Image (cartoon, rainbow, N blue to C red):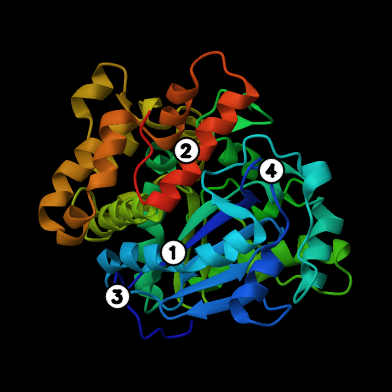
Amino acid sequence: MIENSLHLFDAVGIEMEYMLVDRETLDVRPVADQLLAELAGRAAVSDFTSGPITWSNELALHVIELKTTEPAAKIRSLPSQFEQAIGDLRPALDRLGVRLLPGGMHPWMDPRNETRLWPHENRLIYEAYDKIFDCRTHGWANVQSVHLNLPFGDEQEFARLHAAVRIVLPILPALSAGSPIVDGARTGASDSRMQHYVEHCRAVPSLIGRLVPEAIFDEATYRTEILETIGRDIRPLDPDGVLHPDFLNARGAIARFDRGSIELRVMDVQEYPGADVAICAAVVAVIKSMVAEQSCPLGRQQAMPTERLESILRATSSGAENAVIDDEDYLSLLGVGDDAVRDGGIRAGDVWSALLARIRRDDSALSSLYAPLQIIADQGTLATRICKSLGDDFTREDLHNVYDQLSDCLDLWEPFQP
């Protein structure tokens, strides 16, 4: 275990992925390398740092990532930093005739024919992924997410953080679902990204497991049961050893012992970073309350079976805030819902309302960032708002208009409201 100078909740790291699309048609444009070259003033760079925010490449050329350069001690400062970074990017976007499209999935992208892999630094890694998994699918090339990184300083802190993350992970889509449209049509799920993500590693199932990480609370067991299993399973398919097990782990939350953090990967990117940061602040606040054992002791958190947590995550990925949670033990861990269970369950959105009402009073950062969360509470997740805007019967032109409005939200720094 590497001793980390950062301890529980000392800082956060946030990463957001966006699609690069044609300014007029909104079709994906594989120009991430050109965009980064514009920013850096030289070709073939994989990232560009501008103070507290860094832009970097992803697997596909139509995706670019925006992230904190270093872990941020104050989450409330991040919205303005992200806003500045997106504003600084706009001239380069304009020169290329593209814009950023938010949302967890592009609504009509054809990954089989439109995917172009990153051809520069680390291309051998991307080519290995493509050879083994076939990256020209929605699950690889059309899944734009937010990653939240939380530090731990030692093994004891890892145990407490991992236990809390496992409990909170299943209800994240009830706040962040934003991908109801794929291949030009409604999928019937609010978080279609998660449903495609679950299948993207089917060639080597150990990479993703049950999506919710196993009940493991020390590094040695984690390496033996998860990372070594991944390494053993990938070896016959990667004889040159290009892919490293530590970076192949694709669970909904992964332990990064090399940098002393846990990375949560379950959230769809929202219509503008102010909403993403607000959701991350809510997630951090709830995880902090679990680590503090405010609603249940650590032992009960650690004992919750992975299979039951996975079942709840699948339900919220499908129904988002309208998914009904009726697992009495799970709701008891969160400290909500005793009466509702007797009545047949509680909406996941109401679970969040109860949690946030309880913790907001004592969390000034969350309170200062709360406005986007109020939009979600009042009007639903981004997925719900997209579907409401489209109506029951929509055309390709309607779809274009709604997603054009989503991009406008990113430019204007405002919530998407039907």
The correct choice, above or below, for 125 with respect to 98 in the image is below
Label 1 – label 4 distance at C-alpha: 22 Å
Mark 1 vs 4: CB contact within 8 A: no
Left or right: residue 339 compared with residue 300: left
Q: Which mark is nearer the camera, 1 or 3?
A: 1
Mark 4 vs 2: CB contact within 8 A: no
Label 4 – label 2 distance at C-alpha: 15 Å
Residue 286 spot, x, y in % from top left: 27, 52
SS category of the residue bearing label 2: helix
Label 1 – label 3 distance at C-alpha: 23 Å
- Residue ID for mark 3: 73
SS category of the residue bearing label 3: loop
- Residue ID for mark 2: 405
The correct choice, above or below, for 101 with respect to 95 in the image is above
- Residue ID for mark 4: 27
Left or right: residue 343 compared with residue 327: left
The correct choice, above or below, for 234 with respect to 29 in the image is below
First reached walking from the N terminus: tag 3 or tag 4? 4
Q: Residue at x 40, y 77 (%)?
A: 52
Q: Residue at x 35, y 26 (%)?
A: 326
- Residue ID for mark 1: 87
Q: Amino acid at mark 1?
A: Gly
First reached walking from the N terminus: tag 2 or tag 1? 1
SS category of the residue bearing label 1: helix
Left or right: residue 297 compared with residue 265: left
Mark 1 vs 3: CB contact within 8 A: no
Label 3 – label 2 distance at C-alpha: 33 Å
Q: Nearer the viewer, residue 20 or 276?
A: 20
Residue 306 spot, x, y in % from top left: 49, 45
Q: Nearer the viewer, residue 286 or 83?
A: 83
First reached walking from the N terminus: tag 1 or tag 3? 3
The correct choice, above or below, for 285 with respect to 320 in the image is below
